[in-house]
Image (spheres, helix red, strand yellow):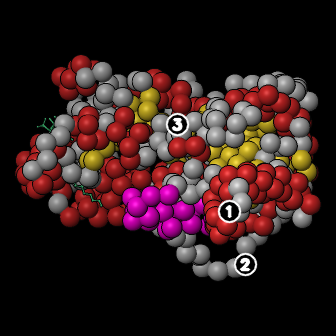
Amino acid sequence: MKDKLEELRQMRANAKLGGGPQRIAEQHAKGKLTARERLDALLDSGTFQELGRLATHNISDFGMADKKYPGDGVVTGFGKIDGRRVAIYAQDFTVLGGSFSEVQSHKVCKIMERAQESGIPVIGLLDSGGARIQEGVRSLAAYGELFVRNVMASGIVPQISVQMGPCAGGSVYSPALTDFIVMVRGTSFMFITGPDVIRAVTGEQVDFETLGGAVAHSIRSGVAHFAADDERHAFRLVKELLSYLPQNNSEDPPRVTPYDDPARRDEILDRLIPGDSSEPYDMRQVISSVFDRASFLEIHAYYARNALVGFTRLDGYPVGVVANQPLHLAGCLDIDSADKIARFVRFCDAFNLPVITFVDCPGYLPGIAQEHGGVIRHGAKVIYAYCEATTPKISVVVRKAMGGAYIAMSSKQMRTDLAYAWPTAEIAVMGPEGAINILYREEIKKAADPAAERQWLLKEYTDKFHNPYSAADMGQIDEVIEPSYTRLRLVMALEILRSKVASNPPKKHGLMPV
Ligand code: HXC
Protein backbone atom coordinates (compact mmCIF):
# COMPACT_ATOMS: atom_id res chain seq x y z
CA MET A 1 0.00 0.00 0.00
CA LYS A 2 2.77 2.39 0.94
CA ASP A 3 4.50 1.77 -2.40
CA LYS A 4 1.29 2.36 -4.29
CA LEU A 5 0.76 5.63 -2.51
CA GLU A 6 4.34 6.65 -3.23
CA GLU A 7 3.90 5.79 -6.90
CA LEU A 8 0.73 7.91 -7.12
CA ARG A 9 2.41 10.84 -5.39
CA GLN A 10 5.32 10.65 -7.80
CA MET A 11 3.04 10.57 -10.84
CA ARG A 12 1.06 13.52 -9.56
CA ALA A 13 4.23 15.46 -8.86
CA ASN A 14 5.57 14.75 -12.37
CA ALA A 15 2.34 16.01 -13.88
CA LYS A 16 2.90 19.34 -12.18
CA LEU A 17 6.06 19.89 -14.20
CA GLY A 18 4.25 20.17 -17.54
CA GLY A 19 6.81 20.31 -20.35
CA GLY A 20 9.72 20.50 -17.89
CA PRO A 21 11.87 23.17 -16.19
CA GLN A 22 13.47 24.43 -19.42
CA ARG A 23 10.11 25.12 -21.07
CA ILE A 24 8.74 26.64 -17.88
CA ALA A 25 11.73 29.02 -17.85
CA GLU A 26 10.99 29.92 -21.49
CA GLN A 27 7.36 30.58 -20.61
CA HIS A 28 8.40 32.88 -17.76
CA ALA A 29 10.91 34.64 -20.00
CA LYS A 30 8.04 35.60 -22.30
CA GLY A 31 6.30 37.25 -19.33
CA LYS A 32 3.75 34.43 -19.09
CA LEU A 33 2.74 32.31 -16.11
CA THR A 34 2.38 28.56 -16.41
CA ALA A 35 -1.06 26.94 -16.51
CA ARG A 36 -0.90 25.98 -12.84
CA GLU A 37 0.42 29.35 -11.74
CA ARG A 38 -2.50 30.93 -13.57
CA LEU A 39 -4.99 28.73 -11.76
CA ASP A 40 -3.36 29.62 -8.44
CA ALA A 41 -3.60 33.32 -9.29
CA LEU A 42 -7.25 33.23 -10.35
CA LEU A 43 -8.91 30.75 -8.01
CA ASP A 44 -9.61 31.09 -4.30
CA SER A 45 -6.76 29.44 -2.45
CA GLY A 46 -7.13 25.68 -1.92
CA THR A 47 -10.36 25.33 -3.91
CA PHE A 48 -9.08 23.70 -7.11
CA GLN A 49 -10.16 20.09 -7.69
CA GLU A 50 -8.26 18.72 -10.66
CA LEU A 51 -9.67 16.06 -12.96
CA GLY A 52 -7.71 14.18 -15.60
CA ARG A 53 -4.23 15.00 -14.32
CA LEU A 54 -2.82 11.68 -15.49
CA ALA A 55 -4.46 11.44 -18.91
CA THR A 56 -2.08 10.99 -21.87
CA HIS A 57 -2.43 10.48 -25.61
CA ASN A 58 -1.84 7.18 -27.37
CA ILE A 59 -0.39 8.54 -30.61
CA SER A 60 2.88 7.01 -31.78
CA ASP A 61 3.42 8.65 -35.20
CA PHE A 62 5.76 11.62 -35.68
CA GLY A 63 7.83 10.69 -32.62
CA MET A 64 4.86 11.23 -30.31
CA ALA A 65 5.53 8.02 -28.35
CA ASP A 66 8.38 9.92 -26.65
CA LYS A 67 6.29 13.00 -26.06
CA LYS A 68 3.83 11.85 -23.46
CA TYR A 69 3.11 14.36 -20.70
CA PRO A 70 0.61 13.60 -17.93
CA GLY A 71 -2.43 15.80 -18.45
CA ASP A 72 -1.57 16.18 -22.17
CA GLY A 73 -1.14 19.94 -22.09
CA VAL A 74 -4.26 21.08 -20.32
CA VAL A 75 -5.17 21.34 -16.63
CA THR A 76 -8.90 20.89 -16.04
CA GLY A 77 -11.20 20.93 -13.03
CA PHE A 78 -13.42 22.96 -10.73
CA GLY A 79 -12.60 25.72 -8.29
CA LYS A 80 -14.07 28.82 -6.70
CA ILE A 81 -13.77 32.52 -7.41
CA ASP A 82 -14.92 34.78 -4.57
CA GLY A 83 -16.63 31.75 -3.07
CA ARG A 84 -18.62 30.90 -6.22
CA ARG A 85 -18.05 27.69 -8.19
CA VAL A 86 -16.43 27.76 -11.63
CA ALA A 87 -15.38 25.09 -14.12
CA ILE A 88 -11.98 25.93 -15.51
CA TYR A 89 -9.34 24.72 -17.91
CA ALA A 90 -5.87 26.10 -18.50
CA GLN A 91 -3.83 25.10 -21.53
CA ASP A 92 -0.15 24.43 -20.90
CA PHE A 93 2.01 25.92 -23.64
CA THR A 94 5.07 24.11 -22.24
CA VAL A 95 3.55 20.84 -23.50
CA LEU A 96 3.62 20.71 -27.31
CA GLY A 97 2.68 24.38 -27.50
CA GLY A 98 -0.60 23.71 -25.67
CA SER A 99 -1.82 22.18 -28.93
CA PHE A 100 -5.34 20.81 -28.80
CA SER A 101 -5.57 17.04 -28.83
CA GLU A 102 -8.18 14.34 -28.53
CA VAL A 103 -7.30 13.94 -24.83
CA GLN A 104 -7.52 17.70 -24.23
CA SER A 105 -10.93 17.67 -25.84
CA HIS A 106 -12.18 14.79 -23.67
CA LYS A 107 -10.98 16.56 -20.54
CA VAL A 108 -12.41 19.97 -21.40
CA CYS A 109 -15.71 18.56 -22.69
CA LYS A 110 -16.13 16.54 -19.50
CA ILE A 111 -15.93 19.56 -17.20
CA MET A 112 -18.16 21.54 -19.54
CA GLU A 113 -20.86 18.88 -19.38
CA ARG A 114 -20.72 18.77 -15.58
CA ALA A 115 -20.77 22.58 -15.51
CA GLN A 116 -23.77 22.80 -17.79
CA GLU A 117 -25.71 20.22 -15.76
CA SER A 118 -24.88 21.90 -12.46
CA GLY A 119 -25.25 25.48 -13.67
CA ILE A 120 -21.63 26.57 -13.22
CA PRO A 121 -19.81 29.19 -15.37
CA VAL A 122 -16.96 27.95 -17.56
CA ILE A 123 -13.63 29.73 -17.87
CA GLY A 124 -10.96 28.82 -20.41
CA LEU A 125 -7.37 30.06 -20.10
CA LEU A 126 -6.08 29.55 -23.62
CA ASP A 127 -2.45 29.35 -24.67
CA SER A 128 -2.31 27.06 -27.67
CA GLY A 129 -1.03 26.67 -31.20
CA GLY A 130 -4.37 25.17 -32.24
CA ALA A 131 -5.09 21.67 -33.50
CA ARG A 132 -2.25 19.27 -32.64
CA ILE A 133 -0.73 18.68 -36.03
CA GLN A 134 0.57 15.18 -35.23
CA GLU A 135 -2.96 13.96 -34.44
CA GLY A 136 -4.33 14.91 -37.85
CA VAL A 137 -8.08 14.57 -38.18
CA ARG A 138 -8.36 13.42 -34.58
CA SER A 139 -7.52 16.89 -33.33
CA LEU A 140 -9.91 18.47 -35.82
CA ALA A 141 -12.69 16.19 -34.58
CA ALA A 142 -11.64 17.13 -31.05
CA TYR A 143 -12.47 20.74 -31.83
CA GLY A 144 -15.82 19.71 -33.26
CA GLU A 145 -16.63 18.07 -29.92
CA LEU A 146 -15.63 21.21 -28.06
CA PHE A 147 -17.64 23.52 -30.32
CA VAL A 148 -20.78 21.47 -29.68
CA ARG A 149 -20.24 21.85 -25.91
CA ASN A 150 -19.68 25.61 -26.31
CA VAL A 151 -22.89 25.96 -28.27
CA MET A 152 -24.96 23.72 -26.00
CA ALA A 153 -23.79 25.63 -22.91
CA SER A 154 -24.43 28.99 -24.59
CA GLY A 155 -27.16 30.89 -22.77
CA ILE A 156 -27.21 28.32 -19.95
CA VAL A 157 -23.97 29.17 -18.16
CA PRO A 158 -21.69 32.16 -18.75
CA GLN A 159 -18.56 31.25 -20.71
CA ILE A 160 -15.42 33.37 -20.50
CA SER A 161 -12.24 32.90 -22.55
CA VAL A 162 -8.93 34.42 -21.51
CA GLN A 163 -6.38 34.41 -24.33
CA MET A 164 -2.95 34.13 -22.74
CA GLY A 165 -0.59 33.32 -25.58
CA PRO A 166 -0.49 32.80 -29.31
CA CYS A 167 -3.86 31.30 -30.21
CA ALA A 168 -4.41 30.00 -33.71
CA GLY A 169 -7.07 28.03 -35.59
CA GLY A 170 -9.46 26.26 -33.24
CA SER A 171 -8.03 28.18 -30.28
CA VAL A 172 -9.82 31.22 -31.59
CA TYR A 173 -13.04 29.61 -32.76
CA SER A 174 -13.93 28.08 -29.44
CA PRO A 175 -13.48 31.46 -27.66
CA ALA A 176 -15.52 33.10 -30.42
CA LEU A 177 -18.41 30.85 -29.38
CA THR A 178 -18.14 31.99 -25.75
CA ASP A 179 -19.62 35.13 -24.21
CA PHE A 180 -16.53 37.18 -23.34
CA ILE A 181 -12.95 37.25 -24.55
CA VAL A 182 -10.18 38.83 -22.48
CA MET A 183 -6.81 39.33 -24.20
CA VAL A 184 -3.47 40.21 -22.63
CA ARG A 185 -1.54 43.03 -24.29
CA GLY A 186 1.81 42.03 -25.74
CA THR A 187 1.58 38.28 -25.11
CA SER A 188 -1.68 37.08 -26.58
CA PHE A 189 -2.54 36.86 -30.26
CA MET A 190 -5.56 35.53 -32.08
CA PHE A 191 -5.74 34.68 -35.75
CA ILE A 192 -7.08 32.06 -38.08
CA THR A 193 -3.96 32.14 -40.23
CA GLY A 194 -0.72 33.72 -39.06
CA PRO A 195 1.58 36.27 -40.76
CA ASP A 196 3.53 33.63 -42.74
CA VAL A 197 0.44 32.13 -44.36
CA ILE A 198 -0.98 35.57 -45.09
CA ARG A 199 2.29 36.60 -46.77
CA ALA A 200 2.27 33.44 -48.89
CA VAL A 201 -1.36 33.73 -49.94
CA THR A 202 -2.02 37.45 -50.27
CA GLY A 203 1.46 38.97 -50.25
CA GLU A 204 0.53 41.20 -47.30
CA GLN A 205 3.26 41.85 -44.71
CA VAL A 206 2.08 42.00 -41.12
CA ASP A 207 3.47 41.15 -37.70
CA PHE A 208 1.76 39.15 -34.96
CA GLU A 209 0.83 42.15 -32.84
CA THR A 210 -0.63 44.19 -35.71
CA LEU A 211 -2.51 41.20 -37.06
CA GLY A 212 -3.95 39.67 -33.96
CA GLY A 213 -2.81 41.44 -30.79
CA ALA A 214 -5.04 42.67 -27.99
CA VAL A 215 -5.14 46.17 -29.44
CA ALA A 216 -6.16 44.98 -32.93
CA HIS A 217 -8.95 42.84 -31.54
CA SER A 218 -10.26 45.30 -28.99
CA ILE A 219 -10.24 48.34 -31.29
CA ARG A 220 -10.64 47.10 -34.85
CA SER A 221 -12.27 43.68 -35.01
CA GLY A 222 -14.26 43.74 -31.79
CA VAL A 223 -13.36 40.09 -31.22
CA ALA A 224 -11.96 40.90 -27.76
CA HIS A 225 -14.13 42.48 -25.08
CA PHE A 226 -11.26 43.42 -22.79
CA ALA A 227 -7.55 44.18 -23.27
CA ALA A 228 -5.68 43.53 -20.03
CA ASP A 229 -2.32 45.10 -19.26
CA ASP A 230 -0.91 41.80 -18.00
CA GLU A 231 -2.07 38.37 -16.84
CA ARG A 232 -2.91 39.47 -13.31
CA HIS A 233 -4.98 42.33 -14.67
CA ALA A 234 -6.79 39.82 -16.89
CA PHE A 235 -7.71 37.79 -13.79
CA ARG A 236 -8.98 40.89 -11.99
CA LEU A 237 -11.20 41.58 -14.99
CA VAL A 238 -12.55 38.02 -14.96
CA LYS A 239 -13.39 38.31 -11.25
CA GLU A 240 -15.06 41.66 -11.75
CA LEU A 241 -17.04 40.37 -14.70
CA LEU A 242 -18.24 37.32 -12.78
CA SER A 243 -19.38 39.54 -9.90
CA TYR A 244 -22.21 40.88 -12.14
CA LEU A 245 -23.29 37.52 -13.51
CA PRO A 246 -25.57 34.80 -12.21
CA GLN A 247 -24.16 31.30 -12.14
CA ASN A 248 -26.63 30.24 -14.82
CA ASN A 249 -29.74 31.29 -16.69
CA SER A 250 -32.13 30.10 -13.98
CA GLU A 251 -30.63 32.34 -11.29
CA ASP A 252 -30.78 36.07 -10.70
CA PRO A 253 -27.54 38.06 -10.85
CA PRO A 254 -25.98 38.46 -7.39
CA ARG A 255 -26.87 41.62 -5.47
CA VAL A 256 -24.14 43.30 -3.44
CA THR A 257 -24.95 45.06 -0.18
CA PRO A 258 -26.10 48.52 -1.32
CA TYR A 259 -23.53 51.22 -0.56
CA ASP A 260 -24.96 54.21 -2.39
CA ASP A 261 -28.07 56.22 -1.46
CA PRO A 262 -30.88 55.15 -3.85
CA ALA A 263 -32.27 58.70 -3.72
CA ARG A 264 -28.92 60.38 -4.41
CA ARG A 265 -29.40 63.25 -6.87
CA ASP A 266 -26.52 64.46 -8.98
CA GLU A 267 -27.45 67.96 -10.08
CA ILE A 268 -24.71 67.94 -12.72
CA LEU A 269 -27.26 66.05 -14.81
CA ASP A 270 -29.63 69.02 -14.81
CA ARG A 271 -26.92 71.06 -16.57
CA LEU A 272 -25.25 68.38 -18.67
CA ILE A 273 -27.06 68.70 -22.00
CA PRO A 274 -25.63 71.63 -24.02
CA GLY A 275 -27.98 74.41 -25.19
CA ASP A 276 -26.87 73.80 -28.77
CA SER A 277 -28.19 70.38 -29.68
CA SER A 278 -25.32 69.71 -32.08
CA GLU A 279 -22.75 69.98 -29.27
CA PRO A 280 -21.43 66.76 -27.78
CA TYR A 281 -21.11 65.76 -24.12
CA ASP A 282 -19.86 62.62 -22.43
CA MET A 283 -22.59 60.02 -21.88
CA ARG A 284 -20.30 58.33 -19.36
CA GLN A 285 -21.16 61.21 -17.04
CA VAL A 286 -24.81 60.11 -17.13
CA ILE A 287 -23.84 56.54 -16.33
CA SER A 288 -21.53 57.45 -13.47
CA SER A 289 -24.05 59.87 -11.95
CA VAL A 290 -27.05 57.57 -12.16
CA PHE A 291 -25.71 54.17 -11.10
CA ASP A 292 -24.02 53.06 -7.88
CA ARG A 293 -20.71 54.83 -7.46
CA ALA A 294 -17.79 53.35 -9.44
CA SER A 295 -19.79 50.30 -10.49
CA PHE A 296 -19.54 50.57 -14.29
CA LEU A 297 -17.62 47.78 -16.00
CA GLU A 298 -17.46 48.84 -19.61
CA ILE A 299 -17.39 46.13 -22.26
CA HIS A 300 -15.90 46.67 -25.69
CA ALA A 301 -14.62 50.00 -24.38
CA TYR A 302 -12.42 50.69 -27.42
CA TYR A 303 -14.62 49.20 -30.12
CA ALA A 304 -17.49 51.10 -31.79
CA ARG A 305 -17.14 53.93 -29.32
CA ASN A 306 -20.29 55.64 -30.58
CA ALA A 307 -22.11 53.20 -28.32
CA LEU A 308 -21.46 52.33 -24.68
CA VAL A 309 -22.35 48.96 -23.17
CA GLY A 310 -21.46 47.42 -19.85
CA PHE A 311 -22.53 46.13 -16.47
CA THR A 312 -23.25 48.36 -13.54
CA ARG A 313 -25.32 48.29 -10.35
CA LEU A 314 -28.41 50.04 -9.15
CA ASP A 315 -29.03 49.87 -5.41
CA GLY A 316 -26.73 46.85 -5.40
CA TYR A 317 -28.53 44.97 -8.20
CA PRO A 318 -26.51 44.25 -11.37
CA VAL A 319 -27.96 45.66 -14.59
CA GLY A 320 -26.82 46.02 -18.17
CA VAL A 321 -26.57 49.53 -19.55
CA VAL A 322 -26.65 50.54 -23.22
CA ALA A 323 -26.15 54.12 -24.39
CA ASN A 324 -25.31 56.18 -27.42
CA GLN A 325 -22.12 58.21 -27.01
CA PRO A 326 -22.42 61.69 -28.59
CA LEU A 327 -18.63 62.14 -28.32
CA HIS A 328 -18.14 59.73 -31.26
CA LEU A 329 -19.94 59.98 -34.61
CA ALA A 330 -22.50 62.13 -32.77
CA GLY A 331 -23.81 58.90 -31.23
CA CYS A 332 -25.09 57.54 -34.56
CA LEU A 333 -25.75 53.84 -34.89
CA ASP A 334 -23.51 52.12 -37.43
CA ILE A 335 -22.59 48.57 -38.37
CA ASP A 336 -20.16 47.97 -35.52
CA SER A 337 -22.18 49.65 -32.78
CA ALA A 338 -25.26 47.71 -33.89
CA ASP A 339 -23.37 44.44 -33.49
CA LYS A 340 -22.02 45.58 -30.13
CA ILE A 341 -25.42 46.57 -28.76
CA ALA A 342 -27.31 43.56 -30.12
CA ARG A 343 -24.81 41.09 -28.70
CA PHE A 344 -24.87 42.75 -25.30
CA VAL A 345 -28.67 42.96 -25.07
CA ARG A 346 -28.94 39.26 -25.95
CA PHE A 347 -26.41 38.36 -23.27
CA CYS A 348 -28.32 40.35 -20.65
CA ASP A 349 -31.57 38.76 -21.73
CA ALA A 350 -30.12 35.25 -21.52
CA PHE A 351 -28.82 35.84 -17.99
CA ASN A 352 -31.66 37.84 -16.43
CA LEU A 353 -29.92 41.19 -16.31
CA PRO A 354 -32.32 44.11 -16.76
CA VAL A 355 -31.34 46.41 -19.63
CA ILE A 356 -31.39 50.18 -19.15
CA THR A 357 -30.91 52.22 -22.33
CA PHE A 358 -29.96 55.90 -22.55
CA VAL A 359 -30.81 57.35 -25.93
CA ASP A 360 -29.12 60.22 -27.73
CA CYS A 361 -28.99 59.14 -31.33
CA PRO A 362 -29.52 61.21 -34.48
CA GLY A 363 -30.12 58.00 -36.48
CA TYR A 364 -28.28 55.33 -38.42
CA LEU A 365 -25.01 56.63 -39.91
CA PRO A 366 -25.43 57.69 -43.55
CA GLY A 367 -22.80 56.72 -46.14
CA ILE A 368 -22.02 54.42 -49.03
CA ALA A 369 -19.58 52.35 -46.96
CA GLN A 370 -22.26 51.77 -44.34
CA GLU A 371 -24.96 50.89 -46.87
CA HIS A 372 -22.71 48.56 -48.84
CA GLY A 373 -21.30 47.11 -45.64
CA GLY A 374 -24.78 45.97 -44.73
CA VAL A 375 -25.96 48.55 -42.19
CA ILE A 376 -29.50 47.40 -42.97
CA ARG A 377 -28.72 43.83 -41.92
CA HIS A 378 -26.50 44.79 -38.98
CA GLY A 379 -28.75 47.60 -37.83
CA ALA A 380 -31.67 45.19 -37.78
CA LYS A 381 -29.85 43.17 -35.12
CA VAL A 382 -30.47 45.94 -32.58
CA ILE A 383 -34.18 45.85 -33.34
CA TYR A 384 -34.27 42.06 -33.19
CA ALA A 385 -32.39 41.89 -29.90
CA TYR A 386 -34.57 44.43 -28.12
CA CYS A 387 -37.82 42.97 -29.51
CA GLU A 388 -36.85 39.45 -28.51
CA ALA A 389 -35.62 40.30 -25.00
CA THR A 390 -38.02 39.49 -22.17
CA THR A 391 -35.78 40.74 -19.37
CA PRO A 392 -36.92 44.03 -17.73
CA LYS A 393 -36.20 46.90 -20.13
CA ILE A 394 -36.22 50.60 -19.36
CA SER A 395 -35.30 53.44 -21.67
CA VAL A 396 -34.45 57.08 -21.01
CA VAL A 397 -34.39 59.48 -23.95
CA VAL A 398 -31.78 62.00 -22.97
CA ARG A 399 -31.65 64.09 -26.12
CA LYS A 400 -31.96 63.02 -29.76
CA ALA A 401 -34.17 60.10 -30.68
CA MET A 402 -34.58 60.49 -34.39
CA GLY A 403 -36.37 58.28 -36.85
CA GLY A 404 -35.28 54.66 -36.89
CA ALA A 405 -32.99 55.22 -33.95
CA TYR A 406 -35.92 56.27 -31.73
CA ILE A 407 -37.68 53.04 -32.47
CA ALA A 408 -34.60 50.80 -32.52
CA MET A 409 -33.12 52.01 -29.23
CA SER A 410 -35.49 50.27 -26.83
CA SER A 411 -38.67 52.08 -27.78
CA LYS A 412 -41.87 51.45 -25.89
CA GLN A 413 -43.39 49.72 -28.93
CA MET A 414 -40.60 47.17 -28.94
CA ARG A 415 -41.64 45.68 -25.60
CA THR A 416 -39.81 48.17 -23.42
CA ASP A 417 -41.50 48.14 -20.04
CA LEU A 418 -41.01 51.75 -19.02
CA ALA A 419 -39.93 54.65 -21.22
CA TYR A 420 -38.74 57.91 -19.67
CA ALA A 421 -37.49 61.11 -21.26
CA TRP A 422 -35.63 64.14 -20.02
CA PRO A 423 -37.10 67.56 -20.90
CA THR A 424 -34.15 67.94 -23.29
CA ALA A 425 -35.41 65.04 -25.43
CA GLU A 426 -35.91 65.64 -29.16
CA ILE A 427 -38.17 62.94 -30.55
CA ALA A 428 -38.95 63.24 -34.25
CA VAL A 429 -38.81 61.45 -37.57
CA MET A 430 -35.84 63.62 -38.54
CA GLY A 431 -34.05 66.84 -37.64
CA PRO A 432 -35.73 70.17 -38.46
CA GLU A 433 -33.44 71.14 -41.38
CA GLY A 434 -34.03 67.90 -43.25
CA ALA A 435 -37.75 67.88 -42.52
CA ILE A 436 -38.32 71.47 -43.67
CA ASN A 437 -36.36 70.89 -46.88
CA ILE A 438 -38.51 67.90 -47.75
CA LEU A 439 -41.88 69.29 -46.69
CA TYR A 440 -41.68 72.95 -47.72
CA ARG A 441 -39.05 73.27 -50.46
CA GLU A 442 -41.51 74.88 -52.90
CA GLU A 443 -43.17 77.14 -50.31
CA ILE A 444 -39.79 78.46 -49.19
CA LYS A 445 -38.74 79.16 -52.81
CA LYS A 446 -41.98 81.01 -53.56
CA ALA A 447 -42.05 83.04 -50.31
CA ALA A 448 -41.55 86.79 -50.47
CA ASP A 449 -38.75 86.43 -47.91
CA PRO A 450 -37.45 82.81 -48.22
CA ALA A 451 -35.00 83.14 -45.30
CA ALA A 452 -37.68 84.42 -42.93
CA GLU A 453 -40.14 81.79 -44.14
CA ARG A 454 -37.57 79.11 -43.53
CA GLN A 455 -36.81 80.37 -40.02
CA TRP A 456 -40.49 80.45 -39.16
CA LEU A 457 -41.02 76.88 -40.43
CA LEU A 458 -37.99 75.64 -38.55
CA LYS A 459 -39.30 77.17 -35.33
CA GLU A 460 -42.73 75.65 -35.85
CA TYR A 461 -41.24 72.18 -36.44
CA THR A 462 -38.84 72.49 -33.51
CA ASP A 463 -41.59 73.66 -31.15
CA LYS A 464 -43.75 70.72 -32.18
CA PHE A 465 -41.24 67.87 -32.25
CA HIS A 466 -38.01 68.88 -30.51
CA ASN A 467 -39.31 67.97 -27.10
CA PRO A 468 -40.64 64.85 -25.43
CA TYR A 469 -44.19 66.11 -25.06
CA SER A 470 -45.78 64.84 -28.29
CA ALA A 471 -44.47 61.37 -27.48
CA ALA A 472 -45.60 61.69 -23.85
CA ASP A 473 -48.99 62.91 -25.02
CA MET A 474 -49.40 59.74 -27.09
CA GLY A 475 -48.20 57.46 -24.29
CA GLN A 476 -44.99 56.54 -26.09
CA ILE A 477 -43.09 58.10 -23.20
CA ASP A 478 -44.41 57.11 -19.77
CA GLU A 479 -42.99 60.05 -17.87
CA VAL A 480 -40.86 63.11 -18.48
CA ILE A 481 -38.45 63.30 -15.56
CA GLU A 482 -35.93 65.75 -14.18
CA PRO A 483 -32.45 64.45 -15.04
CA SER A 484 -31.18 64.54 -11.46
CA TYR A 485 -34.07 62.30 -10.35
CA THR A 486 -33.19 59.60 -12.87
CA ARG A 487 -31.42 57.41 -10.34
CA LEU A 488 -34.34 57.33 -7.95
CA ARG A 489 -36.83 56.74 -10.77
CA LEU A 490 -34.81 53.82 -12.09
CA VAL A 491 -34.41 52.28 -8.63
CA MET A 492 -38.19 52.48 -8.14
CA ALA A 493 -38.91 51.20 -11.66
CA LEU A 494 -36.68 48.19 -11.21
CA GLU A 495 -38.37 47.38 -7.94
CA ILE A 496 -41.60 47.03 -9.92
CA LEU A 497 -40.08 45.07 -12.78
CA ARG A 498 -37.96 42.70 -10.75
CA SER A 499 -40.69 40.07 -10.72
CA LYS A 500 -41.57 40.51 -14.41
CA VAL A 501 -42.60 37.35 -16.22
CA ALA A 502 -42.73 37.44 -20.02
CA SER A 503 -42.05 34.95 -22.76
CA ASN A 504 -41.83 34.56 -26.51
CA PRO A 505 -44.00 32.28 -28.68
CA PRO A 506 -42.76 28.68 -28.78
CA LYS A 507 -40.54 27.97 -31.79
CA LYS A 508 -37.36 26.12 -32.60
CA HIS A 509 -35.50 29.41 -32.83
CA GLY A 510 -35.93 32.78 -34.47
CA LEU A 511 -33.81 33.92 -37.39
CA MET A 512 -31.80 36.82 -36.11
CA PRO A 513 -30.28 38.79 -39.02
CA VAL A 514 -26.61 37.76 -38.88
C1 HXC B 1 1.70 20.59 -32.54
C2 HXC B 1 2.68 22.57 -31.98
C3 HXC B 1 1.61 23.27 -32.55
C4 HXC B 1 0.55 22.54 -33.14
C5 HXC B 1 3.01 24.69 -31.76
N1 HXC B 1 3.53 23.48 -31.50
N2 HXC B 1 1.84 24.59 -32.41
N3 HXC B 1 2.72 21.24 -31.96
N4 HXC B 1 0.63 21.20 -33.10
N5 HXC B 1 -0.52 23.12 -33.69
C6 HXC B 1 4.78 23.16 -30.82
C7 HXC B 1 5.99 23.57 -31.64
O1 HXC B 1 6.32 22.56 -32.56
C8 HXC B 1 7.03 23.72 -30.54
O2 HXC B 1 7.49 22.46 -30.18
C9 HXC B 1 6.24 24.24 -29.38
O3 HXC B 1 4.87 23.93 -29.65
C10 HXC B 1 6.33 25.74 -29.23
O4 HXC B 1 6.05 26.32 -30.49
P1 HXC B 1 6.96 27.46 -31.14
O5 HXC B 1 6.59 27.55 -32.56
O6 HXC B 1 8.39 27.21 -30.81
O7 HXC B 1 6.48 28.73 -30.33
P2 HXC B 1 6.29 30.22 -30.82
O8 HXC B 1 7.48 30.65 -31.62
O9 HXC B 1 5.93 31.00 -29.62
O10 HXC B 1 5.06 30.19 -31.85
C11 HXC B 1 3.79 29.80 -31.39
C12 HXC B 1 2.82 29.61 -32.57
C13 HXC B 1 3.46 28.66 -33.61
C14 HXC B 1 2.56 30.98 -33.22
C15 HXC B 1 1.51 29.09 -32.02
O11 HXC B 1 3.91 27.49 -32.93
C16 HXC B 1 2.51 28.26 -34.68
O12 HXC B 1 2.30 29.01 -35.64
N6 HXC B 1 1.93 27.08 -34.53
C17 HXC B 1 1.02 26.54 -35.54
C18 HXC B 1 -0.26 27.28 -35.56
C19 HXC B 1 -1.26 26.64 -36.44
O13 HXC B 1 -1.25 26.88 -37.65
N7 HXC B 1 -2.04 25.67 -35.87
C20 HXC B 1 -2.96 24.85 -36.57
C21 HXC B 1 -4.24 25.57 -36.61
S1 HXC B 1 -5.44 24.68 -37.51
P3 HXC B 1 9.06 22.16 -30.01
O14 HXC B 1 9.08 20.77 -29.47
O15 HXC B 1 9.65 22.29 -31.35
O16 HXC B 1 9.55 23.18 -29.08
C22 HXC B 1 -6.63 24.45 -36.41
C23 HXC B 1 -7.84 23.86 -37.02
C24 HXC B 1 -9.02 23.98 -36.15
O17 HXC B 1 -6.52 24.72 -35.27
C25 HXC B 1 -10.22 23.99 -36.98
C26 HXC B 1 -11.37 24.60 -36.26
C27 HXC B 1 -12.45 25.06 -37.15
Element at label 2? loop
Q: Which residue is mark 3?
A: 301
**Residue displayed at 53% across by 51% down:** 337
Ligand 1 sits in quadrant: top left
Residue 276, picture quadrant: top right
Circle 3: element type:
loop
Residue 484 magenta: no
Identify the residue at horizontal 7%, vertical 47% (top origin): 63
Q: Decide: marks 2, 3 in contact (CB < 8 A)?
A: no
User: Does the image show residue 498?
Assistant: no
- Left or right: residue 509 versus residue 185 is right
Q: Is residue 324 above or below residue 2?
A: below
State the image coordinates of residue 80 (x, y, percent, origin top left).
59, 34
Q: Residue at x 89, y 37 (%)?
A: 482
Residue 141 visible within the image? yes
Q: Which mark is residue 505?
A: 2
Specify the amino acid type for callout 3.
Ala
Is 171 positioned to the left or the right of 449 in the image? left
Give the crowd class for mark 2: few <14, some 14-19, many >=20 residues within 10 Å: few
Residue 98 has which mark?
A: none
- The type of residue carrying mark 1 is Ile
Magenta stretch bounds? 366-389
Q: Which residue is mark 1?
A: 444
